[in-house]
């Protein structure tokens, strides 16, 4: 595996390190991977902001239960090779371990030559083969606006002697 290289793709964003809650949705031949963004490390995000990775013309994908404990313990197939846990990578080069993986979700068999992507989350790992990828930031919905003017009900009016 000396020819395998890991190119880090998430330079200005990352998934929440504690509870990213990743979810996968298929849209035609595309896969949408949604997750909560890391608002601790990247101050441009606020708690609840969502990241969406779109993998265009994805031929296959999988979610594996490999977590941070397995990765640091050396039981992940890339533990000794990947530069760091919790990052989004493109794998470039020959990967002889691919033949050992059989739990792929197949999407299409007549898609263009694909690139190999890998994202390590806290409690799972996402892997796919796709033509390309893009990142979208979705801001959290603002909290409901509180009415700053106090409202007094009829009971309070009666208690305060404010009868109408």
Image (cartoon, rainbow, N blue to C red):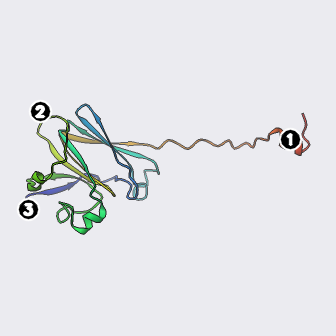
User: Crowding at label 1, few (<14), some or many (≥20) Cα neighbours within 10 Å?
Assistant: few
In the rendered image, the quadrant that contains the N terminus is bottom left
Q: Nearer the viewer, mark 2 or mark 3?
A: 2
Identify the residue under disc 1.
157
Distance between the alpha carbons at the discs numbered 1 and 2: 73 Å
Q: Earlier in the sequence, mark 1 or mark 2?
A: 2
Circle 2 is placed at which residue position? 110
Whether label 1 touches label 3, CB < 8 Å? no
The residue lying at 38 percent from left, 43 percent from top is 137
Q: Is residue 66 left or right of residue 91?
A: right
Q: Identify the mark at residue 104; answer none if there is no mark.
A: none
- Residue behind mark 3: 2
Cα distance in 3D space between marks 2 and 3: 30 Å
Under circle 3, the secondary element is: loop
- Which sits earlier in the primary sequence, circle 1 or circle 3? 3
Residue at 30% x, 58% y is 86
Residue 141, image x, y percentages: 50, 41
Distance from disc 1 to disc 3, alpha carbons, whole Å, reads 79 Å
In the rendered image, residue 163, in percent from the top left (x then y), is placed at 91, 37
Q: Secondary structure at mark 1?
A: helix
How many marks overall?
A: 3
Q: Earlier in the sequence, mark 2 or mark 3?
A: 3
In this view of the protein, which residue sits in the foreground, 128 or 53? 128
Is residue 3 found left or right of 56 in the rendered image?
left
Q: Tell me residue 134's x, y (percent).
A: 27, 41
Residue at image point 7% right, 58% down: 3
């Amino acid at each position: 595996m000396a020819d395998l290289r890991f190119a880090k793709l998430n330079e200005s964003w990352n998934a929440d390190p504690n509870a990213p809650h990743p979810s996968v949705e298929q849209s035609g031949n595309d896969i949408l991977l949604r997750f909560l963004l890391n608002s601790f490390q990247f101050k441009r995000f606020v708690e609840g902001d969502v990241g969406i990775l779109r993998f265009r013309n994805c031929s296959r994908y999988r979610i594996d239960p490999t977590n941070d404990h397995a990765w640091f313990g050396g039981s992940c197939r890339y533990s000794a090779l990947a530069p760091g846990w919790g990052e989004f990578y493109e794998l470039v080069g020959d990967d002889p371990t691919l033949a050992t993986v059989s739990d792929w979700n197949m999407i299409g068999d007549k898609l263009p030559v694909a690139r190999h992507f890998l994202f390590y989350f806290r409690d799972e790992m996402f892997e796919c083969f796709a033509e390309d990828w893009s990142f979208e930031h979705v801001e959290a919905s603002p909290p409901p606006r509180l009415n700053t003017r106090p409202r007094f009900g009829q009971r309070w009016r009666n208690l305060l002697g404010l009868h109408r």
